[in-house]
Image (cartoon, grey):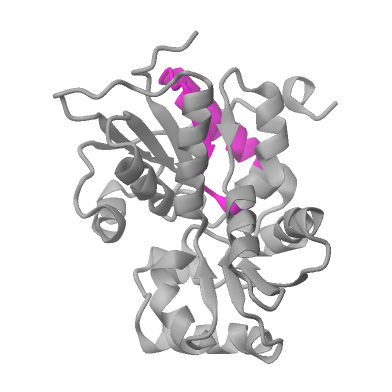
Amino acid sequence: MKRTDAPIGVFDSGLGGLTVLNEIMALLPDENTIYLGDTARVPYGIRSPEVIIRWSFESAMFLLSREIKVLVIACNTASATSLDLLRQRMPVPVLGVIEPGAKAAIRATRTGRIGVIGTETTIKSNAYADVINSLNPDLKVFSLPCPLFVPLVEEGWVDNEVARLTAEKYLKALVKEKIDTLVLGCTHYPLLRETIAQVMGGGVSLIDSARETSLELKKLLEEKALLNEPSSIDASREFFVTDSPAKFKALGSRFLYDRAHYIKEVELMEVWDETRWKKK
């Protein structure tokens, strides 16, 4: 039985998962958190599913070594490829970001025409469309990969001419489809929210799974009796990256407003063992 004051572990391919962490910290301020950004290997979205699964397990095992009580995969690509396997193998509850975002899109749509943008691997997995259509088969889902959005965010190019032209190039196909709801199917994309909204127009609702994921997490902690008790001591916030802590801190301030108490560079262990982890 995990202690209620044990931390929540959150991992992402880089800094995009801070959008999820920010919502977790806002909704659950008494919870201790540990964030791992695999900044040495970002972006995940252009990698094969096999590679992403291996890297996801390495991140998960690092966080488990910190005695977390629950694992949040704050990466759409890792959620699409690794969630089921991690749930089978991890000794703690595991939560992804896709199902919460899909449910939010279903609630938001008025015309039944939903767009999904994400990395190449997330879109190829069809994860969002599968969840949406499993809950409501009458909805039309239009999926589109936007691979350059992640490096734009990682470079801090979120509101310049390059970002706008890239968004226009990618999103014109979804504008033609007359969608009324667009799922930002990568945790990096909310930093491009203003640019994306300008391209899509005011009639399109943008869905960020971060808030929905935090709500699912609170529900999970309540069901497992793992909610931490309020305390006069500030909750612990630890941040780990696999490369460039200074860059992470500079760009991460866009998400966390300098609330990073501790940032350290770490090297992930080679923990992948196909005989142990492969899907049975």
Where's the C terminus, which quadrant?
Answer: top right
- Is 30 displayed left or right of 17 in the figure? left
Given residues 231 and 200, the one toward you in this image is 231
**Residue 47, how many percent across, how many down?**
66, 54
Q: Is residue 62 visible?
A: no
User: How would you classify the magenta stretch by its main secondary structure?
Assistant: helix
Residue 116: image location, x then y, percent: 65, 69
Instruction: Report if residue 277 lies within the magenta region.
Output: no
Q: Is residue 95 above or below residue 200?
A: above
Chain part drawn in magenta:
53-77
Whether residue 106 sits left or right of residue 59 in the image: it is right
Q: Position of residue 86 (x, y in %)?
A: 66, 30
Count of numbered circles in the view = 0
Q: Is residue 74 magenta?
A: yes
Q: Residue at x 44, y 31 (%)?
A: 9
Q: In this picture, is 241 found above or below 118?
A: above
